[in-house]
Image (spheres, rainbow, N blue to C red):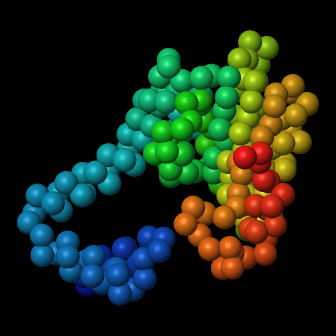
Amino acid sequence: MKPDDPITHLISAFARLPGIGERTASRLAFFVMNQPGDLVDDLSEALQRVKVEVGFCERCSNLTKGTLCQICEDTKRDPATICVVESTPDLRAIERTGEFRGTYHVLHGLISPLEGIGPDDLKVRELLARFGTDSEVKEVILATSPSVDGEATALYLARLLKPLGVNVSRIASGIPIGGELEYADKVTLSRAIMQRRVF
């Protein structure tokens, strides 16, 4: 049930967003109320448009306004390599590096038995559909996070993809640039040692 007070309603709406607590929600609500009407109109229109106009790319499940996203439409991308990510923000993070010129596949989640999320709840079928008889794909990079759910998802996908005759690789994980070894946790440090490369 919505609160009668519009201020309380706005604060409650902001507080439902991930990472927004009651205090931040309150600050955002009062900020919006003190802005000119055109900002509120722009914000309202942007929220409505994104819900109505944005859907999934037919090929990679990225969020897009069209049938195919800009990356899938880009003929300069390498179709032989697919980077599998959990979410569109992860895709955008990799794109910001400027290092990857292949294509993507967005799962929209990770396998998480504790939360009742299985492979059927993700875009796994859509990923497998990309490996038809005329498929150009030679490598799949599994770029899920190094969390328990990310690792479980990567292992599950590797078992499905290897029989299809493609190379399956996993992004490296280890010590961040500028990080101190003494502050690294045991798992991160052991991975950094195991995934070492020739210098």
Question: Looking at the image, which residue sits at the far left?
Answer: 36
Residue drawn at 89 percent across, 42 percent down: 159
> In the rendered image of this protein, does residue 128 appear above or below residue 193?
above
Q: Quadrant of residue 70?
A: top left
Q: Quadrant of the N terminus?
A: bottom left
Question: Looking at the image, which residue sits at the far top?
Answer: 134
Asked whether, in this view, residue 13 is left or right of residue 96, the answer is left
Asked whether, in this view, residue 61 is left or right of residue 123, the answer is left
Residue drawn at 59 percent across, 31 percent down: 103
- Rendering coords of residue 13 (x, y %): 37, 73
Residue drawn at 73 percent across, 34 percent down: 140
Camera-nearest residue between 97 and 20: 97
Question: Looking at the image, which residue sits at the far front?
Answer: 199
Q: Quadrant of residue 161?
A: top right
Camera-nearest residue between 22 and 176: 176
Q: Is residue 42 visible?
A: yes
- Rendering coords of residue 197 (x, y %): 77, 48
Residue drawn at 77 percent across, 45 percent down: 198
The total number of labels drawn is 0
Q: Is residue 121 visible?
A: no
> In the rendered image of this protein, does residue 76 appear above or below residue 111?
above
- Rendering coords of residue 192 (x, y %): 76, 61
